[in-house]
Amino acid sequence: MAVVEREKLLEVKNLKKHFNVGKNAVLKAVDNVSFDIYKGETLGLVGESGCGKSTTGRTIIRLYEATGGNVTFEGKDVHGKKSRKDLKSFNRRMQMIFQDPYASLNPRMTIKDIIAEGIDIHGLAKNDKERMERVYELLETVGLNRAHASRYPHEFSGGQRQRIGIARALAVDPDFIIADEPISALDVSIQAQVVNLMMKLQKERGLTYLFIAHDLSMVKHISDRVGVMYLGNIVELAESDELYEEPLHPYTQALLSAIPVPDPEVERSRERIILEGDLPSPISPPSGCRFRTRCPHAMDVCASKEPKWLEAREGHWVACHLYDNELNTENKQQ
Amino acid sequence: MSMHEKQLNNDLFQPAVRSSDDAEKITKESTSFWQDARRRLFENKGAVSGLIIIVAILLLAFLGPLFSHNGFDDQDTSRTNLPPRVPVLEKVGFLGLDGVDIRGVDQYKMKNQKDNYYWFGTDALGRDQFVRVWKGTQISLYIAFLAAAIDMVIGVAYGAISGYYGGKTDNIMQRIIEILIGIPNLIVVILMILILDPGILSITFAMVITGWTTMARIVRGQILKLKTQEYVLASVTLGAKSSRILTKHMFPNILGSIIITSMFTIPSAIFTEAFLSFIGLGISPPTASLGSLVNEGFKSLQIYPHLVLYPAVIISLIMISFNLLGDGLRDALDPKMRK
């Protein structure tokens, strides 16, 4: 994708979300995360379990109050005190698709009431007939039929439920959708169905996605750019093809080496980078670079200094001392 | 192998027309949660018999006294301690409903009451036990209704506020509950009697103060669980107000637990009242309560067993049937039992 003056839709700057866990213990789920999302693109966010991907998504959409930093949506600050009217208009622009299709639909409500919830809250339909028309239209958009409107969630399969969740988010005509691991609870065959639906909707409606997942191949398939998270930090961010072909950060390299290749010849000789040790506790993360305890290239400086967020190549950002030219020349001089 | 000799050709086949609509079609009849629950409840024999007994006792408690021309406090010393005597059934000897007491004396003949029938007999002051038992049942049912109402109003509201707002509010509200649970019920009732007279009012107040704590805790737990459910979060991201989240998402989902909890609170409240009346802290004479009837009757248990028998049977029936119904409702409403 050519870099031709893309319009920034969402700007996340030094976002922090800390949770208090017990006395004097703070869990830094998200610490100093910054990235931009451009209009019409899909930004993938990957990382292992517990690295703060979901917390990032939930903090952006105000489900959690941010501890620090700011999120700007079309030039307007998302967090902080807001009037009811501002909040409502914000809620219409930004929506979320959830991970667990079995927990994301209220079991006591019919499908039509679930999908129409946004319509009811924002008063988007003048009368009952218009409301039903909208619901039918949305059901057909996500590939379900009218007869499903009066049924209850337990009568549907996981994939169907996830599509109902998408229809609910679409009901308020959002511009930006945060998809929080929308496919990780589904069968592989159904995953493709849901991802294709999401891509089709993006094309038709010009949606922008923040796609959170841990399935690397699926993220590559759907994303224009990909960010890699480790222990509450973003360690690398680049165009999806570039990142997958030439990962710079040692963590990304290890992560990508885990993807199986659909070619037995290559697969046989594929070398995996096995990381040693476990994910450190986010309550007391390592000093300096958070990845240094498991990094095969760890240097002395990694323990003392936090790596800078650098543009190593055009559009390819990485936080690692290996690519800090200033630091490297300094070392050589010594 | 002659069956296979027949040649297969295209004429034998017809294309199956299957539109994309059919692919996602659900043929099963759509049933809501409550329809399912009702079906499961009525399949449960214990729950159904419990329900029937409760309805029967409810009807008798209010219609029963109308069958007799005596009031519950009409005394008449000429007809004291009469054993039960029921028309028609008096001819069936082994039932013991013929007005003959345990010494073999026909009390009705002796006390010149040949034309009268006291179905449950009379007590030491000649009051019609049948009327008194149903009056006492009315008190028990009043207590049952009161316990359920207090649970529903105070317990649910308290638990919902505590769980939904969380944080400091929750912390303070839970400490208050712990203090209330720490005070024994009997102490609260005795303190109430110091201020008010013994009677239905002091029991009512004691229950208002302490009766709702279990419900509040259960509702709080449920709300805490639901608060982090994704469908609630989805509603938040859509911009729903707290009132909408509570009424549309939370209450329909905890209604099952609320019903079950109050079904189990009711028998224990009935028993508490009967117990208090039995030890003399509850209903004061001449008003009858099942507990005070048993108390009066058990003094002459060996000579006039009918005075204890009927109120005791009624208490047991009420408690067993509420428990059976509560069990049935729990099975019917528990989503984990869903087939």
Image (cartoon, coloured by chain):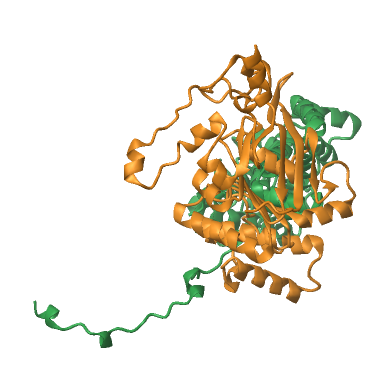
The answer to whether any part of residue B314 appears in the image is: no
**Outermost residue toward the left in this view:** B1
Chain letter tied to orange = A
Q: Position of residue A200 (x, y in %)?
A: 59, 63
**Outermost residue toward the bottom in this view:** B11
Chain letter tied to green = B
Q: Position of residue B305 (x, y in %)?
A: 60, 40
**Outermost residue toward the top in this view:** A334
Q: Position of residue B338 (x, y in %)?
A: 51, 53
Q: Nearer the viewer, residue B115 or A20?
A: A20
Residue A63, located in which quarter of the rendered image? top right
Could you tell me which residue is drawn at 50 percent across and 70 percent down?
Answer: B25
Q: Nearer the viewer, residue B49 or A287?
A: A287
Residue B151, located in which quarter of the rendered image? top right
Q: Nearer the viewer, residue A253 or B164?
A: A253
Q: Nearer the viewer, residue A317 or B69?
A: A317
The answer to whether any part of residue B94 appears in the image is: yes
Q: Position of residue A251 (x, y in %)?
A: 54, 30
What count of labels does the image hold?
0
Vertical order, A47 against B194 (above or below): below
Could you tell me which residue is drawn at 67 percent across and 17 percent down?
Answer: A330
* B98 relative position to B255: left or right: left
Could you tell me which residue is drawn at 74 percent across and 18 percent down?
Answer: A24
Q: For the N terminus of chain B, which image quadrant?
A: bottom left
